[in-house]
Image: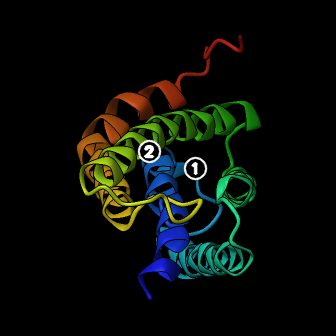
Amino acid sequence: MKDILRPILELLVVLPGLLLGYFPVKTYLKQSPGRLAAWLFPLMACLCIGSGLACYRLHASTVFALAGVALAAICLYTGTLTISLWKSGTIALSVCAVFACVNSLSRAVSAAIIRNLQLPPDGPWLCLGACVFYNAVCWVIVLAAYYPATHTVRAMVEDDNFAQT
């Protein structure tokens, strides 16, 4: 059972990433936040769970699945906003960069756990403890970034003289 959870948990970090991306652009949504959350988060959760189950079934790494899920999330994210593709794409890529760093940290934690418990690496995914760590750190980042994202980053998004470099 825990082996099925490992690839799913690796992919579910897309949900806090989406939430973090929507903080600074709440006023630029094409629909109400509640309505958007009602269809977007279940859709993305199902996509993450389905991709995780496929990775488990194929005993494949989540790298390509995460890239596909993240690309789908970015496309949905930019499509649900009324601001320019340049600004929404910049925010989406910023969130991806932060979470990629957390992924690298989680891989190091997984390696340390496996080494300390002297377990053989039994799959292409993070160990369960590292998966939980990965998700926990991502949600902590979302909570910690709430205020800066809703104030400072929102001011940057609202700036019409935003440099397109």
x%, y% of residue 161?
61, 14
Q: Nearer the viewer, residue 9 or 3?
A: 3
Please, is residue 2 above or below residue 19 in the view? Answer: below
Q: Bin the neighbour count of mark 1 within 10 Å (Cα to Cα): few under 14, some 14-19, many 20 and up.
A: some
Name above or below for residue 21 compared with residue 18: above
**Whether residue 73 is situated above or below residue 149 in the rendered picture:** below
Residue 147 placement (x, y as % from top left): 25, 41
In the image, taking residue 1 as reference, residue 56 lies left or right, namely right
Q: Residue at x 61, y 17 (%)?
A: 162
User: Secondary structure under badge 1?
Assistant: helix
Question: Which quadrant of the figure has residue 108?
Answer: top left
In front: mark 1 or mark 2? 2
- Give the camera-side residue of 48 and 165: 48
Q: Which residue is mark 1?
A: 28
Per the image, label 2 sits on a secondary structure element best described as: helix
The residue sitting at 61% across, 21% down in the picture is 160
Q: Amino acid at mark 1?
A: Tyr
Q: Amino acid at mark 2?
A: Arg
Q: Are marks 1 and 2 in contact (CB under 8 Å)?
A: no
Q: Quadrant of the C terminus?
A: top right
Q: Position of residue 89 (x, y in %)?
A: 68, 37
Which residue position holds label 2?
Answer: 107
Residue 101, percent across and down? 46, 34
